[in-house]
Amino acid sequence: MCGRYALTLTPEELKELLGLLELEDFPARYNIAPTQPILVVVSGESQEKGSNLPDRRAVLVRWGFTPSWVKDPKEFPLLINARAETAVGKASFRAAMRHRRVLVPASGFYEWHRPSKERGESSQAYWIKPRRGGVVAFAGLMETWSSADGSEVDTGAILTTAANASIAPIHDRMPVVIKPEDFSRWLDCKTQEPRDVADLMKPAEEDFFEAIPVSDKVNKVANMGADLQMPVVIEKPPKPPGRKPGDGQLSLF
């Protein structure tokens, strides 16, 4: 799964890397958690004539997907992730897979290796980032939930898939990564149906990410500093498990 991530690039860097026409200023965030506002990229309504830039814009959504048909969000589970293998067939995500696919920009994500509790071993946190740096775009889904009084809340979830060989020793799931050359195809919900983008929902290449063991400070949402990503020394790196794929108003301040 993906339950914490970071976005520390500047707005200028994101505008260039994601092809955004406009992006308001925001602070670096080192410990983004569920229910918080997250930045997502959506396809715009139109393209200016003569412009070579893609028509994309950034919006804020609440991290925790709420289908439009839910009557009371308090009685509905918090959906921060959607399984790529089954999302198109699930009632919660079916409409968003067809009409509201988004990109979730990140500098990387955190994951926990959880050893056997029977042996009394504690979990180990990892900061997992692109080996070559820069931004990574997770595949995401967006939905607007409307209450009985007419108020609306934009919500979102991150798609996950079976972990590749480099991440599997830590966890059996990982976020779906959309490559820059596939941004437009993923965001195009007018001509690209879910079956047309199914090939994009796969694990990242084996050498795309590097996993760095970090302290348990990241466990607390209140900790938000750059020191969360400082490496720590661990005695025994996790070993690959037996192969069982697939089991596998808002403000940024």
Image (tube, rainbow, N blue to C red):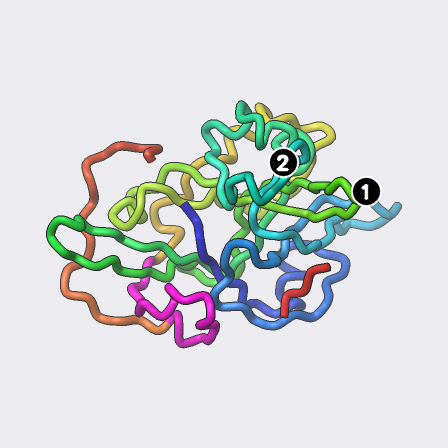
Assess whether residue 221 is covered by the magenta stretch: yes
Q: Residue at x 72, y 44 (%)?
A: 43
Q: Crowdedness of circle 2 by 10 Å Cα count: few (<14), some, many (20+)?
A: many
Q: Is residue 103 left or right of residue 217?
A: right
Q: Residue at x 17, y 48 (%)?
A: 116
| Circle 2: residue type | Pro
Cβ atoms at labels 2 and 1 below 8 Å apart: no
Q: Residue at x 69, y 60 (%)?
A: 250
Label number found at residue 67: 2
Q: Quadrant of the C terminus?
A: bottom right
Residue furthest left as drawn: 119
Q: Mark 2 or 1 closer to N-term?
A: 1
Tell us which disc is closer to us: 2 or 1: 2
- In the image, residue 18 above or below residue 144: below
- In the image, residue 182 above or below residue 226: above
| Circle 1: residue type | Glu
Disc 2 and disc 1: Cα gap in Å?
A: 22 Å
| SS label for mark 2 | loop
Report which quarter residue 101 is drawn in: top right
| SS label for mark 1 | loop
Residue sitting nearer the eye, 217 or 111? 217
Q: Residue at x 58, y 43 (%)?
A: 65
Residue 174 point in image, percent of width and height: 40, 45
Label number found at residue 45: 1
Q: Is residue 38 left or right of residue 86?
A: right
Q: Please report the bounds of the magenta region as a residue range.
A: 211-229
Assess whether residue 214 is covered by the magenta stretch: yes
Q: Crowdedness of circle 1 by 10 Å Cα count: few (<14), some, many (20+)?
A: few
Residue 209 point in image, percent of width and height: 38, 54
Residue 52 point in image, percent of width and height: 78, 49
Report which quarter residue 35 is drawn in: bottom right
Q: Quadrant of the N terminus?
A: top left
